[in-house]
Amino acid sequence: MKKNSLTTAIIAGVAGVAGLAGVAHAVNLNPDGIGQVLLYPYYTTNGGNSTLISVVNTSDVGKAVKVRFLEALNSKEVLDFNLYLSPFDVWTANVHLDDGKPGIRTSDKSCIAPNYVMPDPATGQARFTEFLNYEFEYWRPDLLGVGGHANSPVYNAARKNQGHIEIIEMGDLGGLAHRYALHGMHGGEWKPENCAWFETQWTTMGTPTNPTWLRQSGGTTTDGNNFGRGLHSVYPPGSGYWTTTVPAELEFNDRGGAGGIFGSAYIVNGEEGTAYSYNAEAINGFYTISDADTGNAADQNLHHAPGTVYPSLWQAANYYDVGTNTYYSTATVFNAAGESNTLAFARSTTLPAPDAVSAVLSARHIMNEYAVNGITNAISDWVVTFPTKQLHVYRTRGAVPASTCVTGVPGLAPFSCAQGAGLNGSAGDNVFTGYWPEEFSVDYWDREELEPSTPPDVGLVSPLPPPGQRVVLAFGAEANTLTFIDKALISAEDEEKLEYSVLKAPPSSGGGYYLGIEENFHAGWARIGFDTQSVVVPAPAVTVPGAETTAFQLNGLPVVGFWAARHINHAAGDGISAYYNIIHRHRVTRDIGAAQTPAP
């Protein structure tokens, strides 16, 4: 018997609980940076910048991971592929412009399906893979994507130049997948044995007795919505281990375990000689069940086909209730005092939402420092990214005016208004044309505790909301930048203001915003508050092991990001200027408590 099976059997016997999902881990934001899911808050190709990314497999077992790039305005996928990491492997790529078009280039030899993302097998030269419009124009389009705005062509080209990245661990590699991903001397060079095999598994059907992943997942579809999974040779994420026998053998537990990947990014500007590095946010305990709990063979892993929007952040699962046939994701959330609550979310069968991931990322406030001007000509940007927003707001809103905020839609909270949804080239009732607001408040202080005489308001933030939108402080994109500048510059032309930005995200088409700072407040700290957004987490309908049994409320929004600053010393030497670059992850306060009963 596998060791996970034995442990679960003992616990089930003691507790008397049939179908107990083992000692299921809850979804959690791992401060140590290793997990099953990695969230990279920002990539950019603007203003001479490029973004180098890496992902590291810390495990002695190979990993199948989904790599997904999402554009800034509405988090529509612009590229995804399946990456097959060997034990202790590192994969790297560069996000940059090629002939004015954004995409990635990698010289890394780790296996990828489809193979065209990899270096040319004949020459070994890295190939450029362009970011694509397919999702926002066709598969799950928004109104902007299908030409519903006068500036659609310009915005649709620019929206891919910046965005964010998610990487999801789909399963551990065994059998032929382990063998073919393993690096060794092949054809006179150090590389995996057979990367072509991975693409063949997703492009041919095989036979009923020798099925490929494509056959196991249900074959090709015409709607881009293949929810099936490739099963053979890929086991629950985090389940693989080597026996202590001689020789050691690779075996797999019945269920998943801790994640084994971490990642980082470097925003580099070759002309300026600057580089800003950050670590990806790591979420652990994302998927810790399997077919051993559900009886459904497809739940063995999260190994979906490349080119689909799966796996998705809404697929977190830690417990399965046999009696109600319901999947639950649990999330451990800490309050400001460091006390934890484990919340249980039942997965909807019709409108699933990434509730557990949103819960662990939920912040009432984000805080960081800033510096502008001064003797080092400092410039400062904050990145404010809502990595789960699209999965909450892209929901049917009905035939109502675009200016109407549609609330109360299942799965929408904590975000404010449903955006509408479309399919296969039709925007349906979607009304997104480049701006979908989430209100915020902002306060700032200098380094001597002083506050500005006039609190920041919408007049000190640029650009203003589009015509027809409420004139309030709001972020309209999903990956936003907020540049701190002198208040006297707030009405300057966009091109002039870009000179004061590290990341140079254009307003409107790129999620770039500017905050005008009062004179003599050139350095200090600031706080952004999400004061109007919340979600009530109802008590679970069944007993979920380790989870709270009463309703709770989370206030704020799921958000990640950082402060990036550049300082210049023009007196570093005779005719020499020195650049000093800073990135600091945002600090946050989390606000969780018992759900409030609405007043009668």
Image (cartoon, grey):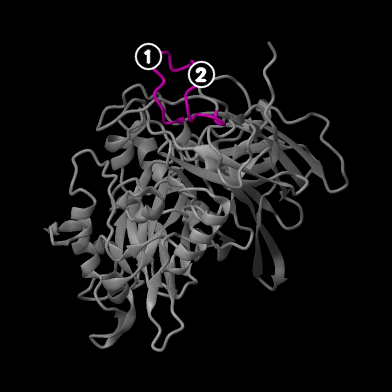
Residue 173 horizontal/vertical position (percent): 35, 68
Residue 335 sits above or below residue 259 on the image = above
* Residue at the image position 36 percent from the left and 71 percent from the top: 108
Q: Which image quadrant: the N terminus? A: bottom left
Mark 1 surroundings: few (<14), some (14-19) or many (≥20) residues within 10 A = few
Q: Is residue 437 left or right of residue 187?
A: right
Q: Which image quadrant: the C terminus? A: top right
Q: How many marks?
A: 2
Quarter residue 570 falls in: bottom right
Camera-side residue of 569 and 54: 54
Residue 462 sits above or below residue 292 on the image = above
Q: Residue furthest top?
A: 600
**Dot placed on the residue nearer the N-terminal end, 1 or 2:** 1
Callout 1 amino acid: Ala
* Residue at the image position 38 percent from the left and 76 percent from the top: 250
Residue underneath mark 1: 399
- The span shown in magenta is 393-415
Camera-side residue of 590 and 352: 352
Element at label 2: loop
Which disc number belongs to residue 524? none
Mark 2 surroundings: few (<14), some (14-19) or many (≥20) residues within 10 A = few
Residue 597 horizontal/vertical position (percent): 68, 21
Main secondary structure of the magenta stretch = loop
Residue underneath mark 2: 405
Q: Residue furthest left?
A: 207
Q: Is residue 304 left or right of residue 158?
A: left
* Residue at the image position 52 percent from the left and 54 percent from the top: 12
396 falls in the magenta region: yes
Q: Is residue 573 visible?
A: yes
